[in-house]
C-alpha cells in the first residue's frame, strides 16, 4: 500500500479534509493508496475544527477522531507522495529534503462563476463560517479527484 501525506499549516482544516476525502475516493476506486495528514505549525493532539468536521459529515465522512500531527514528528520515509495545500507548504517539504518529483500542490479548479477569479490555491477556511468550510471542502474534493486520476 502506498501512502500520501497532505500538509497544511495547523492540520485542523484543509489537510484533514483532504485526507478523509482522498481515502474515501481511493477506496471507492479500489486504489492501493492511503492518505494521512500533518501540519507545519500543528499543535499536538488537537481535534479538527468543528466546521471541518461538519463540512465533511455533510458528505458522509468522519473527522470526529482526528488528532493534529506536527510535520517534524512524522516519519517521512513511509510516504510515496507529499501534497502541500499551498505552494508554501510544498516549499517546506522540499526544504526537508523531499525530492521535487514527490511533491505536489493541491490546486482547485478555476471558478466557472467568476472568470476573473484566477486564484488556484485552496483558501484556508480557518476562522470562517460553515460556508467557507463547505467551499474549501468542495475545492479539495475536486482537486483530490484530479490528483487521484494521475496516480
Image: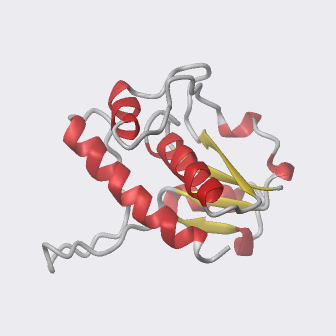
Q: How many marks?
A: 0
- Residue 101 vs residue 13, the one in the foreground: 13
Q: Nearer the viewer, residue 128 or 146?
A: 146
Whether residue 123 is visible, yes or no, is no
Q: Position of residue 124 (x, y in %)?
A: 35, 47
The residue depicted at 77 percent of the width and 60 percent of the height is: 32
Picture colour scheme: secondary structure
Residue depicted at 32% across the width and 31% down the height = 51
- Please state which of residues 87 and 143 is positioned toward the viewer in this rendering: 143
Quadrant in the picture for the N terminus? bottom right
Q: Is residue 21 above or below residue 144?
A: above
Q: Position of residue 142 (x, y in %)?
A: 41, 65
Give the residue displayed 50% in from the left and 67% down from the top: 145
Quarter of the picture holding the C terminus: bottom right
Q: Residue at x 67, y 59 (%)?
A: 82
In this picture, residue 10 sits left or right of residue 2: left
Task: Tell me residue 76's x, y (percent).
Answer: 80, 49
Res. 86 visible in picture: yes
Residue sitting at the far top: 45
Query: Is residue 94 shown above or below 100?
Result: above
Counting from the top left corner in percent of width and height, residue 135 is at 27, 51
Residue 119, picture quadrant:
bottom left
In the image, residue 35 sits, relative to residue 118, either above or below, namely above
Q: In the image, is residue 144 above or below residue 68? A: below
Amino acid at each position: 500500500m502506498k501512502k500520501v501525506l497532505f500538509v497544511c499549516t495547523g492540520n485542523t482544516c484543509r489537510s484533514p479534509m483532504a485526507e478523509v476525502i482522498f481515502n474515501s475516493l481511493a477506496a471507492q476506486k479500489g486504489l492501493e493508496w492511503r492518505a494521512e495528514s500533518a501540519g507545519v505549525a500543528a499543535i499536538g493532539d488537537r481535534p479538527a475544527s468543528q466546521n471541518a468536521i461538519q463540512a465533511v459529515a455533510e458528505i458522509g465522512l468522519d473527522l470526529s477522531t482526528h488528532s493534529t500531527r506536527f510535520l517534524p514528528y512524522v516519519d517521512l520515509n513511509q510516504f510515496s507522495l507529499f501534497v502541500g495545500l499551498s505552494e508554501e507548504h510544498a516549499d517546506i517539504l522540499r526544504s526537508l529534503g523531499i525530492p521535487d518529483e514527490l511533491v505536489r500542490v493541491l490546486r482547485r479548479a478555476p471558478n466557472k462563476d467568476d472568470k476573473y477569479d484566477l486564484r488556484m490555491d485552496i483558501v484556508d477556511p480557518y476562522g470562517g463560517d460553515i460556508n467557507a468550510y463547505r467551499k474549501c471542502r468542495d475545492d479539495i474534493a475536486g482537486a483530490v479527484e484530479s490528483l487521484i486520476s494521475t496516480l
